[in-house]
Image (cartoon, helix red, strand yellow):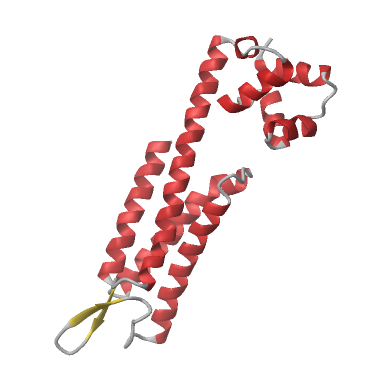
Amino acid sequence: MEFNEKLQALRKQKGLSQEELASMLYVSRTAISKWESGKGYPNIDSLRQISKLFGVTIDGLLSADELLSAAEADNKEKQNKIYNTVFSLLDTSCVLFLFLPFFAVRNTDTVQAVSLFALSGTAPYLKTAFCSVTALIVMHGILSLILQNFHHPLWQNSKNKISLVLSSIATIVFIVSNQPYAAVFLFCFLTIKTTMLIKGQ
């Protein structure tokens, strides 16, 4: 008997619905449904809770191959959490544009580096574009940090892609508007994010 069949049988023996079991394990009903349909395995902490709840050993729940798959899935989940945190922190750190001299103001003979707050002599539409892309990136970073434990598939599959798109747009805006410091700063972040996404595949 496979793990998904064992879990379903144990749940029904206890007279529990998927919602009730999910509440007892502090996971979503979707997670229980996924486990029972054989589309995934619980992480190690959830396996311990299931073992304790139903009075069975983890070895009794999982075969050797399933245990290996569960460990791999757990490692993948931990890696994704680290990646998501790094993405969120990189995005949030763009708030530094407001306070540090990442923008160039060109005078007759000199170029002065200023913060976004102190940026003057730039066309209003450009300053609006700078503020808008910076605000969107920072807000996305904060939202990603707040929703770290929100496991909706649409959000999980799209948040890092949204981060990449926003960073790419901002980098292009800064390059086109001849703001090399801000563009290089964001391009470095973009390179880190792209490398992490490729490694995570």
Is residue 43 something one can see in this rendering? no
The residue located at (74%, 35%) in the rendering is: 23
The residue located at (66%, 18%) in the rendering is: 51
Counting the numbered discs, the total is 0
Residue at far left of view: 109
The residue located at (66%, 16%) in the rendering is: 3
Where residue 158 sits: x, y (%)? 54, 49
Is residue 84 something one can see in this rendering? yes
Quarter of the view holding residue 100: bottom left
Could you tell me which quadrant the N terminus lies in? top right
Where residue 82 sits: x, y (%)? 44, 41
Residue 158, above or below 132: above
Residue 62, above or below 80: above
Residue at far right of view: 15
Lateral position of residue 167 relative to residue 142, left or right: left
Where residue 138 sits: x, y (%)? 47, 63
Could you tell me which quadrant the C terminus lies in? top left
Where residue 137 sits: x, y (%)? 46, 63
Q: Residue 124 versus residue 23: which sits nearer the camera?
A: 23
Residue 133, above or below 153: below
The residue located at (59%, 27%) in the rendering is: 45
